[in-house]
Image (spheres, rainbow, N blue to C red):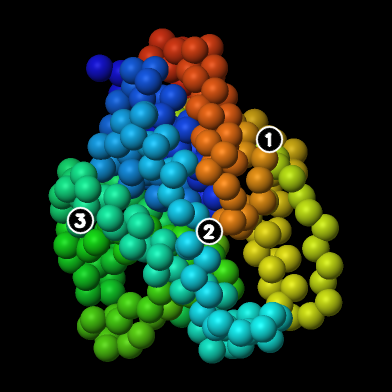
């Protein structure tokens, strides 16, 4: 059996391309020993953990009703309604539809809570914006009084994908302190969480990272447009920086030529994203036998 650990970067609807990349790894004969991801990467990791195969991944992510996930918090004339949504709900969209879609897809495979999986098999990153803490789910939820094994996987995905200002932050109660805690996108803490996977010489880690996509001109004329520009920059600015030599195991660059928050994409656009991610990943696995090549080990080994 060819085992790898998979780590998926966050990036909004670019996650469709990451799903394609994961599908190619499965078709290349690899089995994921563990999975980790942030935001959209957490969603992809959850679907793979649930047992979706290559064909099922393509069908589900390309036929999903992505536009419906923009469930606005205030139905009103723009931009007044959007500003009201930000003020009243701390986000333009509820995120409820996203949660419902993910929950339904995971339940279809019998995955409800983290305890349905081997311990440590699936990890996701979130950000506690109330206390300024990065949280590695599910284990990190014990700090707030929750049993990690009984925590819903779909809710963890929703928490990790709470893009600031775009989706409402998720409120959980700190069960021991009886205080409300707001959680937002895990990308605030770690967008590409390779550090959460334990290095093992016999099981390589493969990180799936997005390469530079389009960068639209944002006309910044008020608080709403400023918030939108900040969100977009936070999700794509890293892609334009020089790529240093990394101390990870392996990196697969996944093309995703789309704005991260372009949820109003068509099924054809979704299929194109998936197929491009699939082809790039299939080519990479064809050229790189991760079981035989010497690994570029990390300088430090973290759990």
State the quadrant of the N terminus.
top left
Residue for badge 2: 67
Label 3 and label 2: CA atoms lie apart by 25 Å
Badge count: 3
- Residue 13 rendering spot, x and y as whole percentages: 55, 50
SS of the residue under disc 2: helix
SS of the residue under disc 1:
loop
**Which numbered disc, 1 or 3, marks the residue that appears first in the sequence?**
3
Q: Residues within 10 Å of mark 3 (few under 14, many from 20)?
A: many
Q: Which residue position is annotated with label 3? A: 112
Q: Distance from label 2 to label 1 (Cα)?
A: 36 Å
Visible residue check, residue 134: no
Q: Residue 233: where, in percent of width, then height?
A: 70, 58
State the mark number for residue 244: 1
Which circle's residue, 3 or 2, is located before the other in the chain?
Answer: 2
Image height of 190 relative to 200, above or below: below
**302 and 99: which is toward the camera:** 99
Towards the viewer: 197 or 239: 239
Q: In the figure, residue 252 lies in which quadrant?
A: top right
Q: Are marks 3 and 2 in contact (CB under 8 Å)?
A: no
Q: Is residue 284 above or below residue 52?
A: above
Number of other residues with Cα within 10 Å of mark 1, as a class: few under 14, some 14 to 19, many 20 or more: few
Q: Nearer the viewer, mark 2 or mark 1?
A: 2
Mark 1 or mark 3, whichever is nearer to me: 3
Residue at 42 percent across and 35 percent down: it is 58
Query: Going from the N terminus, do you reach mark 2 or mark 1 first?
Result: 2
Is the C terminus in the top left, top right, bottom left or bottom right quadrant?
Answer: top left
């Amino acid at each position: 059996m060819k085992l790898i650990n998979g780590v998926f970067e966050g990036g909004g609807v670019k996650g469709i391309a990451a799903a394609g990349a994961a599908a190619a790894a499965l078709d290349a004969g690899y089995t994921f020993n563990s999975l980790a991801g942030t935001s959209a990467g957490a969603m992809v990791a959850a679907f793979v953990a649930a047992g979706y195969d290559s064909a099922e991944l393509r069908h589900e992510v390309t036929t999903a009703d992505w536009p419906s996930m923009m469930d606005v918090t205030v139905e009103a004339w723009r931009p007044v309604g959007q500003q009201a949504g930000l003020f009243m709900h701390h986000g333009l969209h509820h995120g409820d539809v996203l949660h419902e879609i993910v929950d339904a897809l995971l339940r279809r495979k019998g995955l409800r809570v983290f305890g349905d999986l081997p311990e440590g098999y699936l990890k996701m990153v979130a950000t506690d914006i109330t206390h300024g803490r990065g949280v590695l789910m599910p284990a990190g939820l014990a700090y707030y009084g929750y049993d990690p094994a009984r925590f819903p996987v779909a809710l963890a995905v929703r928490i990790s994908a709470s893009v600031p200002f775009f989706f409402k932050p998720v409120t959980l109660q700190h069960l021991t302190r009886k205080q409300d805690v707001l959680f937002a996108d895990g990308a605030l803490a770690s967008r590409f969480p390779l550090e959460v996977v334990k290095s093992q010489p016999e099981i390589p880690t493969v990180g799936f990272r997005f390469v530079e996509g389009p960068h639209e001109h944002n006309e910044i004329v008020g608080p709403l447009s400023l918030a939108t520009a900040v969100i977009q920059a936070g999700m794509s600015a890293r892609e334009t920086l020089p790529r240093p030599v990394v101390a990870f195991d392996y990196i697969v660059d996944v093309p995703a030529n789309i704005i991260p928050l372009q949820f109003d994409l068509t099924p054809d656009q979704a299929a194109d994203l998936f197929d491009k991610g699939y082809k790039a990943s299939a080519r990479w696995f064809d050229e790189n036998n991760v079981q035989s090549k010497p690994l570029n080990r990390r300088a430090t080994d973290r759990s």
